[in-house]
Image (cartoon, rainbow, N blue to C red):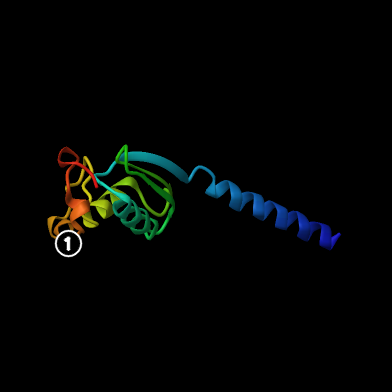
């Protein structure tokens, strides 16, 4: 009987922990300025370093970043501010000019001037 109660307590605990975490994952896509595969690599690795981000995929052609994150650990504002710090502006946050100037030339070329 004691082992049955222990097993039930364990199952209940696991179920409770699972339900507490339910609904905390969020997926969003938003504009981030970028030109090339180096921009893609920089953005994906830089955003994945944020605690709570489980996935970051940048689409160079559409200039969109698709992120999946735990809403209890981070939020879109933190993610967009990190993009800007990396030298890549969003609609809400302008790029960090100093960091942008340190990017390779191909990453600084605007779409109107053409891509490499």
Q: Is residue 49 left or right of residue 89?
A: right
- Find numbered disc 1 in the image and state the secondary structure of the residue it sits on: loop
Measuring 79% from the left and 57% from the top, which residue is drawn there?
5
State the image quarter where residue 101 is shown. Answer: bottom left
Q: Position of residue 94 (x, y in %)?
A: 17, 47
Is disc 1 surrounded by few (<14), some (14 to 19) or many (20+) residues within 10 Å?
A: few
Q: Position of residue 102 (x, y in %)?
A: 17, 62
Q: Which residue is mark 1?
A: 102
Q: Position of residue 62 (x, y in %)?
A: 32, 37
Q: Height in image: 86 above or below 62?
A: below
Q: How many marks?
A: 1
Q: Height in image: 71 above or below 48?
A: above
Q: Is residue 13 left or right of residue 53?
A: right
Measuring 60% from the left and 50% from the top, which residue is drawn there?
18
Measuring 17% from the left and 51% from the top, which residue is drawn there?
108
Q: Nearer the viewer, residue 14 or 61?
A: 61
């Amino acid at each position: 009987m004691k082992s049955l109660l222990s097993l039930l307590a364990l199952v209940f605990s696991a179920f409770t922990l699972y339900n507490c975490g339910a609904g905390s994952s969020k997926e969003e896509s938003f504009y981030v300025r970028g030109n090339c595969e180096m921009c893609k690599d920089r953005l994906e690795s830089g955003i994945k370093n944020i605690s709570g981000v489980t996935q970051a995929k940048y689409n160079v052609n559409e200039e969109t970043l698709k992120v999946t994150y735990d809403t209890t650990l981070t939020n879109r504002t933190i993610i967009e501010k990190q993009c800007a710090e990396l030298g890549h502006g969003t609609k809400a946050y302008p790029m960090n000019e100093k960091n942008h100037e340190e990017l390779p030339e191909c990453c600084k070329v605007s779409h109107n001037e053409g891509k490499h």
